[in-house]
Every structure is written in structure tokens, then in C-alpha cells.
Image (tube, rainbow, N blue to C red):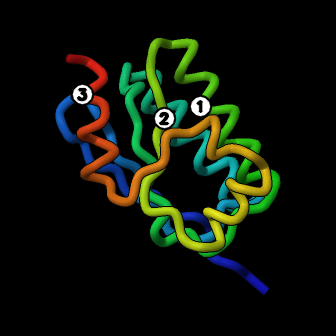
Amino acid sequence: MNRPVLQIGTEDRDAVTVLHLKGRLVLEDGDAVFRDAVNELAARDRVSLVVDLAEVSYIDSAGIGVLIGRYLSLRRRGGDMKLANLTARSHRVMTITQLLDVFDCFDSTEEAVESFAIANR
């Protein structure tokens, strides 16, 4: 059975890039797609990212791992990654893994984007 690969749409809002994810952030489907997308953005000095999880149906340990890995990579470059629109399932995974203490999470992409502006004031 062929499952759809994670789809990522990007939207630049001034210095912040919003990544709209759709699908499953899982081993062999979404993790490499996400990693490559973030690496490409970082190579262009787009290191302030908001990850919109509204349409992510499932996250596994590989998905969690790639989120953490890219977060750390962006932080080393002076950037940041914030999460927005966590579904109930994504929120539960973040709670269990205690990643709500690591990532700044927001109810909307607008709030997450605005948080970068507030931090830079």
C-alpha cells in the first residue's frame, strides 16, 4: 500500500517562514522530506520557522526526532523553530515526550509569527 508522502507548503512572512505540513511526519515518509525542507531553508538563511501541524495526522518517534534535530540545527545558526496548530494527537505526543517544555507552541500561525517580532523588540 502506498501512503502519501508528507507535503510541505511554505509561506514567507517577512523574516519568518511558515511551513504548512500535510500528512504523516513519520519514518521513511515525512522525516526526510521535513529534514530536507528545513535544511534548504537554512542554507538560504531562513532560520526563523513556524511549523504548522494542523494537517499532520500522525507523528512517530522519527518525526519527533527530526523536529528536535532541525530545532537544534536552527538554534545553532541563531534561528528558532516554533510549532503552531497542534492537533489533539500531536499535543498528546508532545506532552508524553515532554517537548512542550522545549518548543514554543501556539494556537495559530499568526501568534507564532508574531512571537518572533516580540522577541526581537
Q: Position of residue 60 (x, y in %)?
A: 78, 61
Q: Nearer the viewer, mark 3 or mark 2?
A: 3
Q: Position of residue 19 (x, y in %)?
A: 41, 50
The quarter of the displayed image where residue 68 is located: top right
- Identify the residue shown where x is 66% and y is 60%: 25
Within 10 angstroms of label 1, few (less than 14), some, or many (20 or more) residues?
A: many
Above-or-below relation of 72 to 26: above
Q: Position of residue 92 (x, y in %)?
A: 69, 65
Q: Position of residue 69 (x, y in %)?
A: 69, 32
In the picture of the structure, the residue carrying the numbered disc 2 is: 81
Q: CA distance from mark 3 to mark 1?
A: 20 Å
In the picture of the structure, the residue carrying the numbered disc 3 is: 118
Above-or-below relation of 61 to 54: above
Q: Which mark is residue 71?
A: 1
Quadrant of the image containing the N terminus: bottom right
Q: Earlier in the sequence, mark 2 or mark 1?
A: 1
Q: CA distance from mark 2 to mark 1?
A: 6 Å
Report if the CB atoms under discs 2 and 1 are less than 8 Å apart: yes
Kindly give the residue lying farthest to the bottom in the view shown. 1
The quarter of the displayed image where residue 20 is located: bottom left
Within 10 angstroms of label 3, few (less than 14), some, or many (20 or more) residues?
A: few
Q: CA distance from mark 3 to mark 2?
A: 15 Å
